[in-house]
Amino acid sequence: MNCRRLVYVVVWFNLYVACTFIQVSGLDASNFSKCWFPAIYNFGDSNSDTGAVFAAFTGVKPPNGISFFGSLSGRASDGRLIIDFMTEELKLPYLNAYLDSVGSNYRHGANFAVGGSSIRPGGFSPFPLGLQVAQFLLFKFHTNTLFNQFSNNRTEQPFKNSLPRPEDFSKALYTFDIGQNDLAFGLQHTSQEQVIKSIPEILNQFFQAVQQLYNVGARVFWIHNTGPIGCLPYSYIYYEPKKGNIDANGCVKPQNDLAQEFNRQLKDQVFQLRRKFPLAKFTYVDVYTAKYELINNTRNQGGRQVLKVTQNLGKNNVSLFLVINLIIIFLLVN
């Protein structure tokens, strides 16, 4: 099974489960019987940023976007992201970033994810989850107002068609891919023990963000857990290897253990959300396992175990290595 097919399998299995739950519950069954969502509203970091950093900071440079899109796509990637595969399979257009105002069409959703973002404020990015949700609330208010102001005449119709329909907000899919940077920032500035102690507060703020969306009508939530952060190149480069702390794939085991603890508590949080909001549907997506499976079976996927190259690289070569690593990974996906 190649990388692209594995991504499709993961996405479609979880979509199938989500749609099954929706049908069983009877929640707008006529609309969702074929897994139909009129829009997607996404919140997250660089794993799902489709142009926010590019629009706000022009921080995305070539070769990002070259292989699939043919030019800079706003993604910190040479190809598509999981959110792109999701929109493709749901027959929706790629999501425009909320911060990218030039040529954007928001009829079928908007992307509030910003590269470097975390759940808690004060991390790598000035756009934490709470601010992203606040931007969504403002977006919803303003687009509803404009939609109702525009008439259906020939002059105003194109502008109206670029706005989300007010009734679609309650039928949309709300997706989250965030939390990785909370762990990474904590590891850079505190100890692993302190990061573990901070997880309940991180997830409490995540809970509050979901509650805000629920209060304004969101009902279908799709939540990614965090990936194996110990397999990121910089994790190995900036971590002092110790006997037994590096696995067979060159990943830092304690950092992956931290990610798994975060995911365990996140999964518990999702169960709490289900009890707190019985009218909503929550799908917990195990991205960690999917990503680690790709890394563990790199050779079977036609790639090379690039993490092992770090053993022969010094910190002065970090930038070069990261570029090479990103190119290889995203060429595999595309």
Image: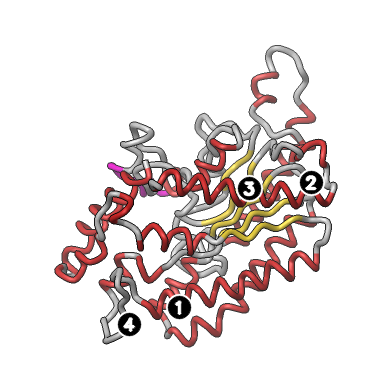
Badge 2 density bin: few <14, some 14–19, many ≥20, Cα 10 Å? some
Cα gap from disc 3 to disc 4, whole angstroms = 36 Å
Disc 1 designates what residue?
257
User: In the image, which residues are magenta?
Assistant: 57-63
Name the spot of residue 281 as percent of width and height, x first. 75, 55
Badge 1 density bin: few <14, some 14–19, many ≥20, Cα 10 Å? some
Amino acid beneath label 3: Leu
Amino acid beneath label 2: Gln
Cα gap from disc 4 to disc 2, whole angstroms = 45 Å
Q: Earlier in the sequence, mark 4 or mark 1?
A: 4
Q: Nearer the viewer, mark 3 or mark 1?
A: 3
Q: Earlier in the sequence, mark 3 or mark 1?
A: 3
Give SS at disc 4: loop
Name the spot of residue 93 as percent of width and height, x first. 56, 32
Q: Nearer the viewer, residue 178 or 132?
A: 178
Disc 3 designates what residue?
15
Amino acid beneath label 4: Asn
Q: Nearer the viewer, mark 1 or mark 2?
A: 2
Q: Earlier in the sequence, mark 3 or mark 2?
A: 3
Q: Are marks 3 and 4 in contact (CB under 8 Å)?
A: no
Amino acid beneath label 1: Asp
Give the number of the disc on residue 23: 2
Disc 4 designates what residue?
245
